[in-house]
């Protein structure tokens, strides 16, 4: 029972996280939503500074390594910074529908964030590991979230500021990493306090960047998969389009098993468009595609060949099986209940032409043969199923 009580909240949290990743694409957020995210991360960074400085003040054994007067004064500055960051989040939601806010608030937020980075970077060393990790990580996140002009308008001045601080420190004009008491360090690179401080500042930055980039990468892959899937489908009927059908047809032919192709054309479809309008005609095509899909096997492939014409690719199927499947689809379409917006019944029927790879070595020749069979059905009254072999037999007689 205890295990269930523990695992249930964990599973619920995991489900919430997964739903957020799958349904909330950060890359599609508005500039104000991205600004709010960045400001929340900045608040977390400022809070971590308060934790670090508070810990030092409570540990007398660490006082020798730090510049205590500066630490004390910086606590107040961090509190003010945290308050300003929280206040900047308010316009992100209060003015979310205002065009001026979409342009100005992200710019101010990014500038404020970089000013804070420069200030904190100078305090712990302009070229210290923590400053460099924060600098590179923030650039990467910024370029992903915002327009380049917004990011560069902040990072170019920040780069100049850090470079000037480094130059002035090298020439003794200003102290390097004034938050630390380097006179008490024998070897700064191996001093436990220095190393622990760098680790304290680096790990949250790396953790946030890793999580954010992992979310963005996952969402990018989902988006690419979705776009790739859309490129394979007919936008109206949601069945395969002509290009994707060609790919499947060539793949079936390469695998060297028997297959059949069924071409079908909706009878007198132009009349439906003329009488009920193109919108109703589109709805009819959608319902026809759904009806055909329900009457096919799992391995069968359906696509829109063009206009009111559909194609069925039937793998591992001989001509007799294909004829049975086509006849089943014909009956299903004939019985399909379709009504207009005025609730008038619309009669649906279709003509079917079939051919098989058994009688042709080229897949596109199989399609042409099915098309000839379909043409023969149209010429002899429509709403029938014919195979290419049947029409060639009649012609030979």
Image (spheres, rainbow, N blue to C red):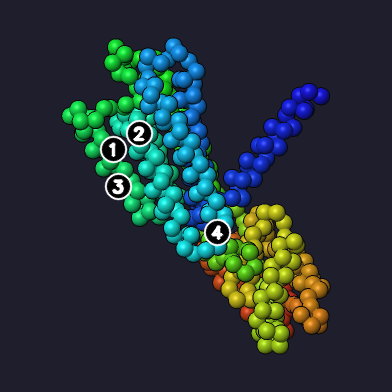
Q: Quadrant of the N terminus?
A: top right
Mark 3 or mark 4: which comes first in sequence?
4
- Depth check, front residue: 9 or 110: 110
CB contact under 8 Å: marks 3 and 2: no
Please report contact status of discs 3 and 4: CB closer than 8 Å, yes or no.
Answer: no
- Residue where numbered disc 3 is placed: 156
Q: Tag 1: Cα neighbours inside 10 Å, few (<14), some, or many (≥20)?
A: many
Task: Name the disc covering residue 162, or none.
Answer: 1
Local secondary structure at mark 1: helix
Alpha carbon distance from label 1 to label 4? 34 Å
| Residue 265: image location, x then y, percent | 66, 76
* Residue 377 appears in the rendering: no
**Is 369 left, or right, of 328 in this rendering?**
left
Sequence order check, earlier mark of 3 and 1: 3
Q: Which residue is mark 4?
A: 96
Residue drawn at point x = 31 percent, y = 27 percent: 177
* Residue 288 falls left or right of residue 119: right
Q: Secondary structure at mark 4?
A: loop
Residue, x 71% and y 85% (percent of image)?
A: 276
Name above or below for residue 40 compared with residue 289.
above
Is residue 271 shown above or below 63? below
Residue that mark 2 sits on? 121
For marks 3 and 2, give the one nearer the viewer: 2
Q: Position of residue 212 (x, y in %)?
A: 50, 41
Q: CA distance from mark 4 to mark 2?
A: 32 Å
Q: Residue at x 62, y 69 (%)?
A: 236
Mark drawn on residue 64: none
């Amino acid at each position: 029972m205890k295990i269930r009580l523990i695992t249930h909240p964990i599973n619920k949290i995991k489900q919430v996280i997964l739903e957020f990743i799958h349904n909330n694409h950060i890359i599609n957020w508005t500039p104000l939503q991205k600004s709010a995210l960045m400001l929340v991360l900045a608040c977390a960074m400022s809070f971590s500074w308060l934790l670090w400085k508070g810990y030092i003040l409570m540990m007398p054994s660490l006082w020798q390594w730090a510049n205590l007067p500066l630490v004390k004064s910086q606590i107040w500055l961090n509190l003010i910074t945290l308050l300003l960051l929280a206040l900047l989040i308010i316009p992100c939601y209060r003015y979310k529908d205002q065009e001026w806010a979409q342009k100005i608030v992200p710019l101010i937020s990014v500038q404020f964030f970089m000013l804070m980075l420069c200030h904190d970077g100078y305090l712990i060393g302009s070229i210290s590991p923590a400053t460099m990790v924060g600098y590179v990580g923030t650039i990467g996140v910024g370029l992903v979230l915002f327009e380049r002009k917004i990011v560069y308008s902040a990072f170019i001045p920040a780069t100049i500021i850090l470079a000037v601080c480094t130059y002035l420190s090298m020439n003794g004009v200003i102290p390097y990493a004034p938050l630390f008491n380097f006179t008490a360090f024998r070897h700064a690179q191996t001093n436990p306090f220095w190393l622990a401080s760098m680790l304290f500042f680096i790990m949250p930055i790396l953790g946030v960047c890793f999580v954010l980039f992992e979310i963005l990468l996952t969402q990018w892959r989902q988006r690419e998969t979705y776009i790739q899937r859309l490129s394979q489908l007919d936008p109206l009927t949601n069945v395969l389009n002509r290009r994707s059908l060609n790919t499947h047809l060539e793949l079936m032919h390469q695998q060297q098993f028997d297959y059949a192709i069924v071409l079908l054309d909706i009878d007198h479809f132009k009349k439906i468009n003329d009488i009920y309008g193109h919108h109703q005609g589109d709805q009819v095509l959608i319902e026809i595609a759904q009806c055909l899909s329900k009457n096919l096997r799992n391995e069968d492939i359906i696509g829109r060949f063009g206009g009111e014409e559909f194609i069925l690719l039937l793998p591992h199927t001989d001509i007799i099986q294909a004829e049975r499947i086509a006849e089943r689809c014909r009956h299903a379409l004939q019985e399909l209940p379709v009504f207009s917006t005025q609730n008038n019944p619309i009669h649906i029927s279709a003509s079917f032409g079939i051919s098989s790879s058994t009688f042709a070595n080229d897949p596109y020749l199989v399609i042409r043969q099915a098309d000839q069979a379909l043409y023969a059905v149209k010429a002899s009254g429509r709403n029938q199923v014919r195979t290419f072999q049947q029409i060639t037999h009649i012609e030979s007689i």
